[in-house]
Amino acid sequence: MSSRIDWSILTILALPWLQLLIYRGWIYTASHLIDPWVYLGYMLQPAQYLKVFAGTYYGTRLSWILPGHLLYELLPPIVANYVLHLGVYYLAAISLYLILKLHFGWRTGLVTAIAMGCYPYFIMAVGWDYVDGVGIAYCLLTMLMLTYASTSRYWQLALLLSGCSCGALLISNITWVFCIPSLLVYFLCSNKFYQKRALITSFQFTIVGLIISIIFFGLINYSINRDFLFYLPSINFALSSVGKPNPFTQDWSNWLPQATWLLLPVFAFISSILLVWLNRIRKIILSALVIGFQLCFILFFSLQVILELKGTIFLQSYFYASYSIPFLFLAIGSQLASVLERLRKIEVGLALSLCIIISTTFLLVDPVDETLIPYYPDLALAYCCLYFFVGVCSLLLAQSRIPRKVAVIAGLVLVLTLTTPVLKTAMLASDLGRRNQQEEDYLATMDANKILQSIDPEIKLVFWYDGNEAHVYRAIASTYLWGYRLISEEFPSLSTPYLSIEQVQKQLQQHPKVVILSKQTYPLSPLVKQSLSKAGFQAKPLASYPINRGQRSFTMTVIEVSKI
C-alpha cells in the first residue's frame, strides 16, 4: 500500500498549510481593493446579481463565480474561503507537478511545483478573489489534459476534457485567449514526441469539449435570466477595447522600477532564448519537450510585451503579468530537469527547503502594503537567487569531475550570502498583528453582507462612507459592484472624484435608501444634513446595525433620503 502513495503530492498538499501557519492573511482579499470583492458579491448572490447587473462583464465569469457560490452555499463563510482558495492552489500546483512528472520525473515535478507554490505572485494570485488565480489553475489543468492526450491510451477523453477546461479558462477571463497559441505549440511538441495523434481529429475532440463547456454555463445563465448568450458582454468589452490604450496605463518610468513581478519572468525569458539558440546553433542535445516548453513561454511573454507596447497593462499590473506563471514554471522546470533528476533525495530536500525559506521571507512582509514597496526588489532578488542557485548546480554537475555535493554546497553558500540582508529586511518590516486584521475585515464584510441580503433583496442600496476611516468600508461597498452603488467615499461630504454632484443627485433619486458606514453611532450629524441639503435632499434614519469583529467595530446605518 505504501508504494502506491505519492509522497510528492502529499508534500504539495502540506505546503500551503505551512504558509498559513506563518501568515494566514494571504488567503484573504485585502480590504482596500475593489474588483476581487465584486466577485465575492457575485458568489454570494449570483442569481440576483446576474439580473440586477445584467450586461456587465463581471457576471460572465461563471467558471469562477459558480464554484465559489456552491461552496458558500454548503459551508460556513470562513471554511468556504479556505476550501475555494486552497482548491485553486492545489489544482494549479498538482497539475504542474503531474505534467513535469510525466515528461521528466517526480523530482522535476516536485521541486518545480513547490517553487511555484512558494512564488510570491502565485500566492497572491490564488489567495484573493480576483480571477487570475483560477485562470492559472485552469490553464495548467488544460495542459495536463493535453499531456494525457499525448501519453495515455484514453486520449480522446483527455482531449475532450482539455477542451472543457480551456472553455472554463476563457470564461474566467477572455484575456486568456492570448495563451491559445502557446497551448497549440505545447500540444504539437508533446504529440510529436509521443504518440503522434491525428491532428485534425485531436482538434475536433478539443473543440467539442470547448463547446460543451460554453453550453453548460450558457444553460445555467439561461435558467437564471433567460439569456443563453451570457458571454457577449465580455466579447463586446474586449472588442471595444481593441486599438484603445487602457485608461490606467502609466508611463514606463513610473511603474517599471517597482515591477518586481517581472524579474523572474525576464530572467527566465533570457535563459529560454539562450537555450533555444544553443540548441539550434551549437547543436546541444535537448528533447523536443524541453524546447517546446521554452517556445511556449517565449511566445506568451512576447505577446505580453507587444500588448504592453500597444497601450495595455499586461506587464505593469501584476495581476495580468501573473498570467505567464504556468508557462514560466514549465519553462524553468524543463530547463532544470536534467540536473534535478540526477539529485539524490536528500539533495531534493535541500532544494525544497530553499524554496520554503524564500516563501517564509516573503510571507513575513505584507504583499499588498504599499508602504513596503521599497522592500519588494530584495524579495524578488532572493527568489531569482534561488533560480540562479539551481542553475549553478546545473553547470557544475555538467562537469563530471565535480561531485554533486560540491555543486549543491556552492549554490547554497551563494544563496545564503545574497539573501541574508533580505531576511533581515523582512524581519524588520513585518508586523504580523496588524496584518492578521485581513481575516477580521473579511468576517466583518461577510457579517455586513448577511444583513444586507436580509434587508435589501433587490440590491438597491447605495453606500456612503469615509474611505480613510476604515478600508473595510470599501470592501463592503465593492461586493455591491462599488461604482454602481456608490454615493461618496468622503463622508460626511458628498463630493467625490469618481462622481459629479449631478451624478450623485441622480444616484440618490434612483436609490433613495443609503447605507452609511461609520464608527459614529448616530451618523446623521449636522454636517451630514448640511451636505444632503446642499444637494437638495433631506433624510430620516431607518435602522442601525452594529458590526463587531475584533478590532473592526463600526455601525451600518440605513437612511432614506427624499427631495426637499
Image (cartoon, rainbow, N blue to C red):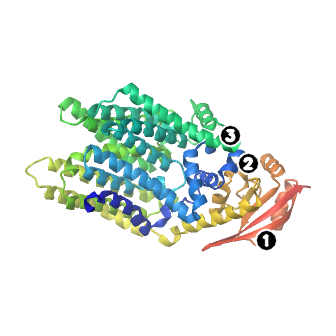
Label 2 CA crowd tier, 10 Å (few <14, some 14–19, many 20+)? some
Quarter in which the C terminus is drawn: bottom right
Q: Decide if residue 492 is on the left or right side of residue 405.
A: right
SS for dot 2? loop
Q: Earlier in the sequence, mark 2 or mark 1?
A: 2
Furthest toward the bottom, the residue is 550
Q: Is residue 357 above or below residue 151?
A: below
- Pick out the residue farthest to the top: 200
Left/right placement of residue 318 relative to residue 109 reads right
Q: Label 1, secondary structure: give it.
A: loop
Q: Secondary structure at mark 3?
A: loop
Residue at the extreme right of the image, as rendered: 564
The amino acid sitting under disc 2 is Leu
Residue shown at 25% from the left, 33% from the top = 277
> Residue 180, how many percent across, how many down?
44, 34
Do the residues bearing badges 2 and 3 touch, measured as CB atoms within 8 Å? Answer: no
- In the rendered image, which residue does mark 2 sit on? 499
Amino acid on which the number 3 mark rests in the picture:
Gly
Q: Hey, which quadrant is residue 548 in on the image?
A: bottom right
What residue sits right under mark 3 in the picture?
55
Residue at image point 38% right, 52% down: 93
Q: Residue 522: which numbered mark, if any?
A: 1
Quarter of the image where the N terminus is located:
bottom left
